[in-house]
Amino acid sequence: MRPKQQQKARHDDLFRARLDQIINMKHELVALADKIDWAWLDEELAGCFSDHGRPAEPVRFMIGMFLLKHTYGLSDEQVWDCWVHDPYFQYFTGEEFFQHELPRERSGMSHWRKRIGDRLDVLLQESLRLAHDTGALKKSDLARITVDTTVQPKNIAFPTDARLLETAIRQLGKLAREQGVPLRQSYRRVARHAAMMAGRYAHAKQFKRMNKQVKFLRTRLGRLIRDIRRKTESDERLREIFALPLSKAMQIRSQKQRQRGWKLYSWHAPETECIGKGKARAPYEFGVKVSLTTTNKRCKGGQFILHAKALPGTPYDGHTLKEVIEETEALTGREIERAYVDKGYVGHNAPRPHRVFRSGQKRGVHGQIKKELRRRSAIEAVIGHCKTDGHLGRNFLKGTDGDRINAVMSAVGYNLRLILKWLRKLLPKIIAAIWTAITPRSMLKQAS
C-alpha cells in the first residue's frame, strides 16, 4: 500500500524535546532537508506501491535514510545507529521530537530497495534540481559533458581455482546436511587443507605442486556431484533444490583459467564479471562496468554527476555512448552540445558524432574546444571520490539490481556532498550580508 504520511503534532510535548529547539537551524543538513521536495518524491514513487494492504513507511523517512547513508558513506546498520543519537539525522527524516529508540524496523531499507530500485533516477534528478536552486549549478553547465566508465567491484574474494573448488565442496556439503541427504564422504576437511596448500605453493611459485592440489580438489568435487545425483534422482523435490547448486558446481569444476566465454567467479554473486581496464596496479577487477557522466566545466559548487548507470555484460564503451547521452538529456532536460570522452570510445554510436571529442584528437579541436578537452581527465577525480567517500569502491548489494542501485545512489551521495559543502560556505556569506545590511552605516565607520 502507498506510504503513510508523517503527522505533525498539534501541541508541544512536555516530556520530549523538540528538534528545532535543540539543533542549529542554520546547519547545512537542516537547510538541505528544507529544500528537498518531499511531496514530489512521494508522487513520483507512488506507482511502486499497491492500493491495498498495510501502509508502507513514510517516504521522507526511508528516502532520507538512503540519502544519509550514501552521503556519509555508511552501511545500513551504521546509518540506523547514527540516527538514534544524531538529532540532525532525525530532523532530516521528518521527525519533530527527539527519539531515543528506533521507531521502525531495520529491514525496511532492504524492502524499499527492491521496491523502488527502478525509480532511483528521480533522486539523481532531485539532487541536480537542488544544486540549481542553491546556485551551485547553472543550466548552461549541463550542455557540455564528460563521459567515462569505471569498474564497480563486487564484495567477493579474489577468485582462484582452488578457492572456488573448495567453496563448491563446502556449499554442497552444507546443503546436503540441511536436506538430510547422506553422503559417502563430505571432503570438507581435506578440501580445506588442499586449498590452503595450493595457496602456499602458489606463493612459493611451486606451480606443479599447486596444480596437483587443484586437480585433487577438482576430483573430489566431481565425486561429490555424482554422489548427490545418485541420492536425489528418485526425489523430485530434492532435484529441484539441488538443481542450481549442482549447475554452479559443474561450471566451477569444468572451467579453466584462460578459457574464453562466461565464467563463474563467485558462488554467492554469479553476476560478477572480470573486467580489465589496463591498470598496472589492478590488471583485472571483478564486478560490473559503470558509466558516469559529469559536467565538463567545474561549476560553482563543483563538478556534478549528471548520469550514472551500471552496464552488465561488459559492453564496449563506444556502443554505450548513444544510450548514455539520450538518458542524460532526458534526466537534465537540456540538449547536449558537446561530449568529451577518452580513447576507449573510438567507433562510438553517438547520434551527433561530430559533437563528440576524444582525448588525443587533433582534427576540429581548437579554441574553446581545446580547453574543454583538456578538462576531460577531471572526471577521474570524481570517480575517485565516489569510490573513496561513497560506496562505488565496493558493492555490498545483491544481484544485478544491487549493482544498478549502488551505482545510482553513489552518484546521488556524491552530488549531495557537494551541495552540503556549498551550503556550508554559502550560509556564512548570507548571514554576513544580512548583518551588513541591517547595521547602521555609522557603526561600520571606524572612530577617528
Image (cartoon, rainbow, N blue to C red):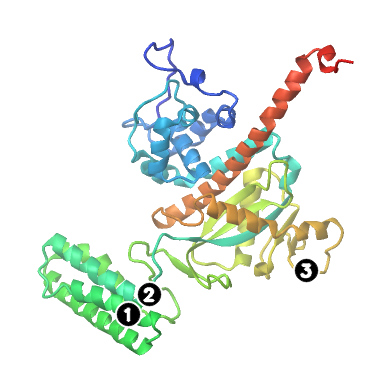
State the residue position of label 1: 198
177 or 198: nearer the eye?
A: 198
| Precedes in sequence: disc 3 or disc 1 | 1
Identify which residue is drawn at 44% across, 42% down: 116
What crowding class fits label 1: few (fewer than 14 Cα within 10 Å), some (14-19), or many (20 or more)? Answer: many
209 or 364: nearer the eye?
A: 209
Question: Residue 422 at x, y = what percent?
Answer: 66, 37
Q: Quadrant of the C terminus?
A: top right
Give the mark toward the camera: 2 or 1. Answer: 1
Q: Is residue 322 left or right of residue 73?
A: right
Give the mark toward the camera: 3 or 1. Answer: 1
Question: Residue 283 at x, y = what percent?
Answer: 53, 73
| Precedes in sequence: disc 2 or disc 1 | 2
> Can you tell which mark lies on residue 160?
2
- Residue 376 occupies which quadrant of the picture? bottom right
Q: CA distance from mark 2 to mark 1?
A: 10 Å
Q: Do the residues under discs 2 and 1 have CB atoms within 8 angstroms?
A: yes
- Residue 187 occupies which quadrant of the picture? bottom left
- Residue type at numbered disc 3: Gln
